[in-house]
Image (cartoon, rainbow, N blue to C red):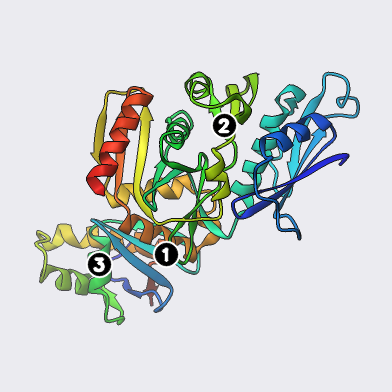
């Protein structure tokens, strides 16, 4: 996990999403797995919607426009950890 | 197999073979009123075979085999052969059915809409469905509800209802003896007795209807009703489905739509009579 790592969304069409009440459902087509996600995963995916690779810092900036995420030094590692988990599930891709 | 019968239950056809005549005769009697299979290949084969070379005659024991099997299934006594046949059919459905999303739930229909009840074994879903089926509702199934992948309708699977322990006397009081199977004592699940659904439920077994309400009943607790959030409902139903993973994207779409459209509630109840009253009240409120 590093704050320098950049990520982009999975290829278009690889993930089907559906919102049910306060949860999000993501169907990952390549693996056939369904992921049930809650905040902040849907918000992170939404903030990455333009498909261009983003760093953890970029993402913090985008999210901070809509949410109060507290001091940067505590928010950055948390977002980095979320991104690493999401990449491990195949929901986003790490890019060099 | 020396003795055979082909049965159709809802959209599924089963070819059941047995080394003994007893279980086949019992199945023929209990499924006598079911519409005949349309011919062609059966969807599943169930075989009731002797557990060993001599076990056909000497303390006869049954092995259930078929297209889909469990490697470590324990042999059963010939006295429980009807249960073995029913378990064999359930197993084939649970492991092999792909045409619908299969939910481990009972279902009954009234006013052209379906009430589904999902829960663990012992939750009371099967007994409650059987009771409602004798009180103005159409019993669609006590074990599996089949959800149409495209339209979202619930399709019936009205196999014999498997009554366990205390439920046997409760239901037998309402139902003529001709619709009841033999009492199977001391099975791995306790005492079991099968019941054939009413003739109208059997005659309408090809007739689906849209789902209107989903309950998660729990027998043996003070009366309580709690609306269930969509996230919890979705999670519970993925666990209650035996083919959600196998169906992939089609199941994701069908189950998402089901949870989006059908209100769900957890219902605790202390007795069958109280449960029936609670269901009728809920149904009226939602009418």
Residue beneath the point at 30% across and 82% down: A52
> Where, by quadrant of the figure, is residue B75 drawn?
top right
Instruction: Name the secondary structure under disc 3.
Output: helix
Q: Is residue B233 above or below residue B245?
A: above
How far is mark 3 from mark 1, CA to CA? 23 Å
How far is mark 2 from mark 3, CA to CA? 49 Å
In the rendered structure, find residue A68 and report the number of the disc placed on it: none
> Where, by quadrant of the figure, is residue B236 drawn?
top left
Q: Is residue B252 visible?
A: yes
In the rendered structure, find residue B162 and report the number of the disc placed on it: 2
Q: Earlier in the sequence, mark 1 or mark 2?
A: 2
In the rendered structure, find residue A44 and report the number of the disc placed on it: 3
How far is mark 1 from mark 2, CA to CA? 31 Å
Q: Are dots 1 and 2 in contact, CB under 8 Å?
A: no
Residue beneath the point at 90% across and 25% down: B54
Structural crowding at the residue carrying mark 3, measured as other residues with C-alpha within 10 Å and reported as few (<14), some (14–19) or many (≥20): some
- Nearer the observer, B259 or A3: B259
Query: Quick check: do tags 3 and 1 share a chain?
Result: no
Residue beneath the point at 54% across and 53% down: B243
- Nearer the observer, B246 or A68: B246
Structural crowding at the residue carrying mark 1, measured as other residues with C-alpha within 10 Å and reported as few (<14), some (14–19) or many (≥20): some
| Mark toward the viewer: 3 or 1 | 1
The residue that label 1 is drawn on is: B253
């Amino acid at each position: 996990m590093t704050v320098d790592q950049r990520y982009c969304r999975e290829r278009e069409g690889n993930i089907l999403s559906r919102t049910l009440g306060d949860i999000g459902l993501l169907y990952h087509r390549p693996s056939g797995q369904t992921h049930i996600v809650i905040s902040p995963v849907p918000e992170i995916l939404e903030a990455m919607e333009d498909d261009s690779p983003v760093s953890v810092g970029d993402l913090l900036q985008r999210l901070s426009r809509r949410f109060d995420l507290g001091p940067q030094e505590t928010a950055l590692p948390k977002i980095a950890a979320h991104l690493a988990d999401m990449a491990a599930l195949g929901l986003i891709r790490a890019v060099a | 197999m020396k003795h055979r019968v082909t049965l159709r239950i809802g959209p599924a056809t089963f070819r059941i073979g047995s080394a003994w005549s007893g279980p086949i005769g019992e199945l023929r009697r209990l499924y006598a009123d079911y519409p005949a299979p349309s011919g062609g290949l059966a969807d599943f084969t169930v075989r009731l075979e002797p557990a060993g070379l001599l076990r056909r005659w000497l303390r006869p024991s049954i092995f259930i085999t078929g297209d889909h099997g469990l490697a470590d299934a324990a042999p059963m006594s010939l006295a429980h052969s009807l249960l073995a046949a029913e378990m064999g059919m359930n197993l084939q459905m649970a492991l092999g059915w792909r045409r619908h999303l299969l939910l481990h739930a009972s279902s009954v229909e009234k006013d052209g809409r379906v009430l589904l009840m999902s829960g663990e074994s012992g939750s009371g879903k099967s007994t409650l469905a059987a009771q409602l089926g004798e009180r103005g509702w159409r019993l669609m199934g006590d074990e599996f509800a089949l959800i149409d992948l495209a339209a979202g309708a619930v399709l019936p699977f009205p196999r014999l209802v498997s009554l366990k322990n205390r439920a046997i006397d409760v239901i037998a009081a309402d139902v003529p003896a001709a619709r009841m199977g033999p009492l199977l004592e001391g099975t791995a699940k306790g005492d079991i007795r099968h019941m054939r659904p009413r003739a109208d439920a059997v005659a309408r077994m090809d007739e689906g209807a849209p789902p209107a309400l989903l309950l998660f009943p729990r027998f043996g607790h003070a009366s309580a009703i709690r609306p269930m959030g969509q996230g919890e409902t979705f999670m519970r139903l993925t666990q209650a489905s035996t083919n959600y993973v196998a169906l992939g994207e089609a199941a994701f779409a069908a189950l998402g739509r089901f949870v989006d459209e059908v209100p769900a509630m957890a219902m605790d109840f202390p007795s069958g009579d109280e449960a029936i009253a609670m269901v009728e009240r809920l149904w009226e409120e939602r009418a």
